[in-house]
Amino acid sequence: MSTGARWTELLTCPNCRNSGLLQLFQPSGSTYEYRAESVPDGFKIVHTECGELYWCRGCRREAIHSDAGRLHATSEQIN
């Protein structure tokens, strides 16, 4: 079983306002590394050399996700 933290952030398209909850995971001991565990319908992950970006499938625009310090719909430490 992997250890780390899981949390949920709000993902929103700035153009069509489509939104949904993005589930993220950060391995234990990592400061900057995290990955999406699930992406809401209507969005996709685009992998770049700088990390993951989230795009609206319909508008083909980069989505905005909530600041991790402002919205943690759920947060848990996984052991």
Image: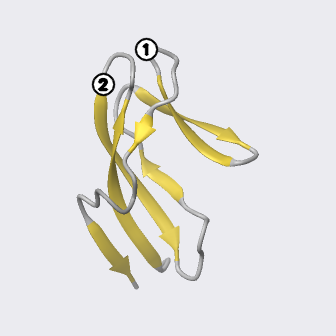
Query: Which residue sits at x=45%, y=31%?
Result: 63
Q: Position of residue 6 (x, y in %)?
A: 38, 67
Q: Position of residue 77 (x, y in %)?
A: 36, 79
Residue lying farthest right?
49
Q: Is residue 75 left or right of residue 54?
A: left
Query: Where is residue 40, by image quadrant?
Result: top left
Q: How is the image coloured?
A: secondary structure
Whether 27 is drawn above or below 66: the answer is below
Query: Where is residue 68, by image quadrant?
Result: bottom left
Pick whichever of labels 2 and 1 is earlier in the sequence.
2
Q: Which is more toward the observer, 66 or 43?
A: 66
For label 2, the residue is: 18
For label 1, the residue is: 58
Whether 48 is drawn above or below 8: the answer is above
Amino acid at circle 1: Gly
Report crowding for label 1: few under 14, some 14 to 19, many 20 or more residues within 10 A (C-alpha): few
Whether 33 is drawn above or below 51: the answer is below
Query: Which residue sits at x=33%, y=16%?
Result: 16
Amino acid at circle 2: Asn
Q: Secondary structure at mark 1?
A: loop
> Are the two marked residues, 2 and 1, in contact with CB atoms closer than 8 angstroms?
yes
Q: Position of residue 24 (x, y in %)?
A: 43, 57
Query: Where is residue 70, by image quadrant?
Result: bottom left
Q: Quadrant of the C terminus?
A: bottom left
Q: Secondary structure at mark 2?
A: loop
Query: Which residue sits at x=29%, y=37%?
Result: 20
Q: Position of residue 66 (x, y in %)?
A: 37, 48
Q: Is residue 43 left or right of residue 71?
A: right
